[in-house]
Image (cartoon, grey):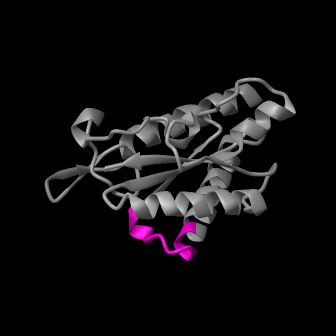
């Protein structure tokens, strides 16, 4: 019975995602992340950064922050990392940064989406307090859907509880 409920929920969420994926606004297709215009061609956006964002480790000065289990609180290390990220964002005035909230696999789909959103909002709020224009940041929650580590050890879970930063143009 639980499996059937999970399947029905997954199908419902998939249908909702498809129906909300894009909408027309003033003749322009929008959707996805806080109303940003959709563009099916990443290369047409002129992005010169790794599409994995800070998770890739390839963008000097822009780093992923991690969270404790079941928490959206920023610890001392996260605040230090975010101060460095704020410098990077301010020095790249032509870039909008998408803050992605992620969770480990524990918890329901709904709970993890909400927790990922709280994490992304906490990061955006802190960066704003450091002087980063909030209009230059968007947020999205992936919950547990985009793990970095696929195992089920404490170390794997810790790698997946994060906020990733993806530069957009």
Q: Position of residue 124 (x, y in %)?
A: 55, 64
Seen from the viewer's position, the closer of residues 122 and 7 is 122
Q: Work out whether residue 132 can be spotted.
A: yes
Q: Which residue lies furthest to the top in this view?
A: 151
Q: How many marks?
A: 0
Image position of 86 (left or right of 3): left
Secondary structure mostly taken by the magenta-highlighted segment of the chain: helix
Identity of the residue drawn at 48% across and 57% down:
88
Q: Which residue lies furthest to the right in this view?
A: 154
**Of 29 and 60, the residue lying toward us:** 60
Residue under the point 65% across and 31% down: 148
Residue 86 inside the magenta-drawn segment: no
Check residue 132 for magenta coloring: yes
Query: Which image quarter holds the N terminus?
Result: top right
Name the residue: 64% across, 32% down.
147
Q: Which quarter of the figure has residue 34?
A: bottom left
Image x and y of residue 14, in percent: 49, 35
Above or below, 121 against 156 in this view is below
Q: In this view, does 29 lie to the left or right of 118?
A: left
Q: Is residue 43 above or below residue 81?
A: above
Q: Which residue lies furthest to the left in this view?
A: 27
User: What percent of the width, then of the height, locates residue 58?
Assistant: 51, 36
Residue beneath the point at 31% across and 45% down = 22
The reply, left or right, for residue 74 in relation to residue 100 is right
Residue 35, position as x, y percentages in the image: 34, 57
Question: Which region of the structure is painted magenta?
Answer: 127-136
Can residue 75 be seen? no
Q: Tell which of 35 and 9 is nearer to you.
A: 35
- Closest to the observer: 124 or 144? 124
């Amino acid at each position: 019975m639980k499996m059937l409920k999970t399947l029905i929920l997954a199908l419902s969420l998939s249908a909702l995602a498809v129906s909300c994926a894009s909408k027309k606004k003033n003749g322009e297709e929008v959707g996805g992340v806080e109303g940003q215009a959709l563009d099916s061609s990443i290369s047409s956006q002129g992005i010169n950064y790794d599409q994995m964002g800070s998770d890739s480790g390839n963008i000097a000065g822009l780093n992923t922050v991690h969270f404790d289990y079941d928490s959206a609180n920023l610890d001392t290390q996260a605040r230090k990392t975010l101060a460095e990220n704020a410098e990077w964002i301010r020095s790249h005035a032509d870039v909008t940064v998408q803050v992605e909230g992620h969770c480990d696999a524990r918890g329901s789909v709904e709970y993890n989406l909400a927790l990922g959103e709280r994490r992304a909002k906490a990061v955006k709020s802190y960066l704003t307090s450091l002087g980063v224009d909030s209009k230059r940041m968007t947020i999205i929650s992936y919950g547990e859907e985009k793990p970095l580590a696929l195992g089920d050890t404490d170390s794997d879970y810790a790698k997946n509880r994060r906020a990733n930063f993806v530069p957009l143009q």
